[in-house]
Image (cartoon, helix red, strand yellow):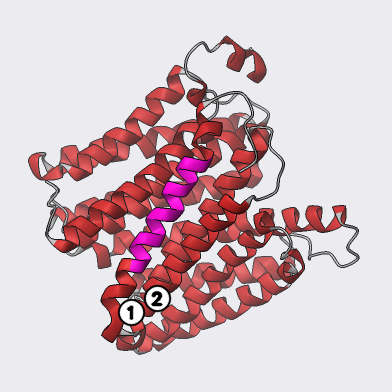
Amino acid sequence: MTTAEQIRAWRGPALFTYGFRPFFLGGAAWAALAMALWIGMLSGSLALPTAFDPVSWHAHEFLFGYLGAVLAGFLTTAVPNWTGRLLIVGRPLAALFALWVAGRVAVAMSAVLTPALAAGVDLAFPVVFAMAIGREIVAGRNWRNLGVLALLSTFILANALFHWEAAQGEYAAEGYGLRLGLAAALMMVALIGGRIVPSFTRNWLARRGEARLPAAPMQRYDRLALGALLCALVLWVALPKGWPTAALLALAGTLHLVRLWRWLGVLTLAEPLVWVLHAAYAFLPLGALAEAVGAVAPGVMGTGGQHLWMAGAVGLMTLAVMTRATLGHTGQALTAGPGTVAVYLALIVAVLARLAAGVLPGVAMPLYHLAGAAWIGAFAGYAILYGPLLLHASPGKRR
C-alpha cells in the first residue's frame, strides 16, 4: 500500500497515524512531568525507586528519555520524505511508543530491577527504532543521511555507557555517557539545524519579497564549522577540562556564531516560528563558549555551559521543530499564535534562569524555582495547545 492507503486503512486512534503524534505529545508530557518529579526529589518530598542518584536520573530522563522521543517523532516523519518509502503506522507505531514508555518506567523503577534488565528495557526502544530507520535509509539509498544514522547510533551507545557507569556506582551525571550523548545531540542540532534554519528562513524571506537572503546551507564554511565542532566535542568528551579543550570549544563557538549570523535571523523578528529557530541555534555556540570558560575556570560557570546546550540548544530547538512540524502536518498555517510565543518565551526564561542560578549562588534557590516552573510551563503548554491537533485527525484552530 502507499503511505496514504496505509494511513486510511488504520482504524485505530489518530494518534498512531504519524510518528510525530505520539512521540511529540509523549515527549512534551514527560519533559513537564519529569521536571515536576525532579523538583519533588530535590525538596525531599518524593523518592523514586530508581537506582540512579537524583541528578543522574534527571539528566538521563531529559537527554535520553525526552530527546529520544522527539528524535523518534521527527525521524519517523522525516525519513519517509527523504527516502520515498512507507512510514511506521498503526500497531507497529503503537508498539514502538510502548517500548519508549517501558523505558521510562524501567529507569524510574530500576532499584527493584537488575541493572542489566533496566538497561535492556530502556535500550530496546532506541535500538529497534534505529534499526527501522537504518533499514529505510539503506533501502531508499539515501546515503546523504547516513550521518544522522551514525549520530543516532552514537547516542544509543552513550545511553548504554550511562547505564554501565551508573551500575558501577559512578556519578553518571558527570560521566562519559552523558557527555557522549550530549555531543551526539549537539551534532544533530548542528547538522539538521544547519539545513532547516537557513532553508525555512530563506523561504519565509522570499515570500515577503526580501532582497537579502541567508547563505545556502551546507557550504564550505558550514563544513569547516561542523568539523571544528566535531573535533571540539570529541576532545570535550574525553577531556572536559584544560586549555586545549577550551581553545577548541572557543574556536567552534566563534565559527558557529558566524554561521548563525550568515542566516540573517535579525530579519525574521516578525515571525516567531522562524526566529525561534535562530534563538535555539544560538545556544549551541553560546554553550560552547561557556564550556570553554568552564574548562579552565570551573568555578565560574559551574554546569552553565551544559545547561545552555541541553535546555537551550537541544530543548528549544526540539520545541521549535515540534511546534512547526505539528502545524505543518495537521494542515495549520505556518505562523505562531500568542500561545506558541508564550511557550517559546517560557523555555528561554527557564534556560536563562538556570544559567543565572549557576553564576549567582546568593539568589540561586529562587532562580531554580523560576527555571523549573518556566520549563514545566513550556512543555505542558505545548501539550495543552497542540494536544488536540496530535490526538485528532481533523485540523483544529491556529495555536
Label number found at residue 358: 1
Give above or below for 380 relative to 25: below
Can residue 356 be seen? Answer: yes
Quarter of the image where the C terminus is located: top right
**Residue depicted at 51% across the width and 55% down the height:** 343
Label number found at residue 366: none
At label 1, which amino acid type do we have? Gly
Looking at the image, residue 389 sits to the left or right of residue 59; the answer is: right
Label number found at residue 355: 2
Residue 140 x %, y % = 64, 31
**Residue depicted at 22% across the width and 62% down the height:** 55
Looking at the image, residue 36 sits to the left or right of residue 202; the answer is: left
Residue 321 x %, y % = 58, 49
Give above or below for 111 relative to 252: above
Inter-mark Cα distance, 2 to 1: 5 Å
Q: Residue furthest left?
A: 112
Depth check, front residue: 343 or 221? 343
Q: Is residue 137 magenta?
A: no
Query: Mark 2 falls on what kind of element?
Result: helix
The 10 Å Cα crowd at callout 1, few under 14, some 14 to 19, many 20 or more, is many
Q: Is residue 374 magenta?
A: yes
Q: Which residues are magenta?
A: 370-385
Residue 389 x %, y % = 56, 33
The 10 Å Cα crowd at callout 2, few under 14, some 14 to 19, many 20 or more, is many
Q: Are marks 2 and 1 in contact (CB under 8 Å)?
A: yes
Looking at the image, residue 230 sits to the left or right of residue 365; the answer is: right
Quarter of the image where one finds residue 350: bottom left
Residue 124 x %, y % = 31, 35
Which secondary structure type mostly characterizes the magenta part of the structure? helix
Give above or below for 301 relative to 324: below
Quarter of the image where the N terminus is located: top right
**Residue depicted at 66% across the width and 65% down the height:** 223
